């Protein structure tokens, strides 16, 4: 698995692992790096079967396998203890790590995530899967921004979106890999295990998310023993991209507040 380690490099520097959504690649976090690297050792990675971590995923691929792969890759780099910030699927990987490797995970930030898959989100995934299977990769890629970004932002960034479309088609993770990762995502259900996730968790969400109803984050937070909730009014499913300055400020405020509490606990 391809990892990149940036930011502070001292032995005692706290480590933040950034885990992307269904796209899977490290480049999603570009808007956060400058803000986070001043305070943390920052690890980004291409998830197995995506980007520079090319591989053929097995049948029965699961969220537990995604978590185990990341835990092993971090251990190979000598990183035993870390916090994780994850977008949607990436946030669920963080919750799975908190369950399976509780001694290694400090805090988890879940961006526009969920406790179990909402019916609306399932419908959106089915539409995207139908496009992929019945129309093709280009149609799937061109539709993707509709689920990620607000219409106003998209209207102002058409040239950027066209460049991204070309890039995503050229570097598409492969139909079989995507379908297996999507199945793992849709199958994840933390309702039976939520009470066991005792680490501090931040559920941060955008009110205008088209893909994941905003109510999913309060539902997730209410099921966890030690959760905080932050709402953003605008930004869509990928508000860390569309409203990065505001998102980064809110994220750092929460991380700093939690660090202060831990220090004086």
Image (cartoon, rainbow, N blue to C red):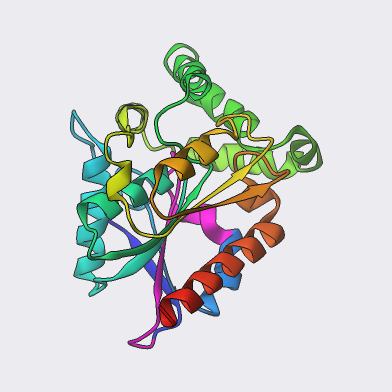
The magenta span reads 10-30
Q: Could you tell me residue 175's position as x and y percent? A: 36, 27
**Is residue 96 among the parts visible in the rendering?**
no
Q: Is residue 84 above or below residue 232?
A: below
Q: Could you tell me residue 103's position as x and y percent? A: 22, 65
Q: Residue at image x 60%, y 28%? A: 142
Q: What is the total number of numbered labels drawn onto the structure image?
A: 0
Left or right of 102, for residue 145:
right
Compare residues 34 and 81 and report the one nearer the observer.
81
Picture quarter containing residue 163? top right
Compare residues 231 and 165 and report the one nearer the observer.
231
Q: Residue at image x 72%, y 36%? A: 150
Q: Is residue 62 above or below residue 118?
A: below
Q: Could you tell me residue 145's position as x and y percent? A: 62, 34
Compare residues 35 and 227 and report the one nearer the observer.
227
Image quarter where the N terminus lies is bottom left
Is residue 119 in the magenta section? no
Q: Residue at image x 52%, y 34%? A: 216
Q: Is residue 86 above or below residue 136?
A: below
Q: Could you tell me residue 137's position as x and y percent? A: 48, 25
Q: Residue at image x 55%, y 72%? A: 257
Picture quarter containing residue 160? top right
Is residue 15 in the magenta section? yes
């Amino acid at each position: 698995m391809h990892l990149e380690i940036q930011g502070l490099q001292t032995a005692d520097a706290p480590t933040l692992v950034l885990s992307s959504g269904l796209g899977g690649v490290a480049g999603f976090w570009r808007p956060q790096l400058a803000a986070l690297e001043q305070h943390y050792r920052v690890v980004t990675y291409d998830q197995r079967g995506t980007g520079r971590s090319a591989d053929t995923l097995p049948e029965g691929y699961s969220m537990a396998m995604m978590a185990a792969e990341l835990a092993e890759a971090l251990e190979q780099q000598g990183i035993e203890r870390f916090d994780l910030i994850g977008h949607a699927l990436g946030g669920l990987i963080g919750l799975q790590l908190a369950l399976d490797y509780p001694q290694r995970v400090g805090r988890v930030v879940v961006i526009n995530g969920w406790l179990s898959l909402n019916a609306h989100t399932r419908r959106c995934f089915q539409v995207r899967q139908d496009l992929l299977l019945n129309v093709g990769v280009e149609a799937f890629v061109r539709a993707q921004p509709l689920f990620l970004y607000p219409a106003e932002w998209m209207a102002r960034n058409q040239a950027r979106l066209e460049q991204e479309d070309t890039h995503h088609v050229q570097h598409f993770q492969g139909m079989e890999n995507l379908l297996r990762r999507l199945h793992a995502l849709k199958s994840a259900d933390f309702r039976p295990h939520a009470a066991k996730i005792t680490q501090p968790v931040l559920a941060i969400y955008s009110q205008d998310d088209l893909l994941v109803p905003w109510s999913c984050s309060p539902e997730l937070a209410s099921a966890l023993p030690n959760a905080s909730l932050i709402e953003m009014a605008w930004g869509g499913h990928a508000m860390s991209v569309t409203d990065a300055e505001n998102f980064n400020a809110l994220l750092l405020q929460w991380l700093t507040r939690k660090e202060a509490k831990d220090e004086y606990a």
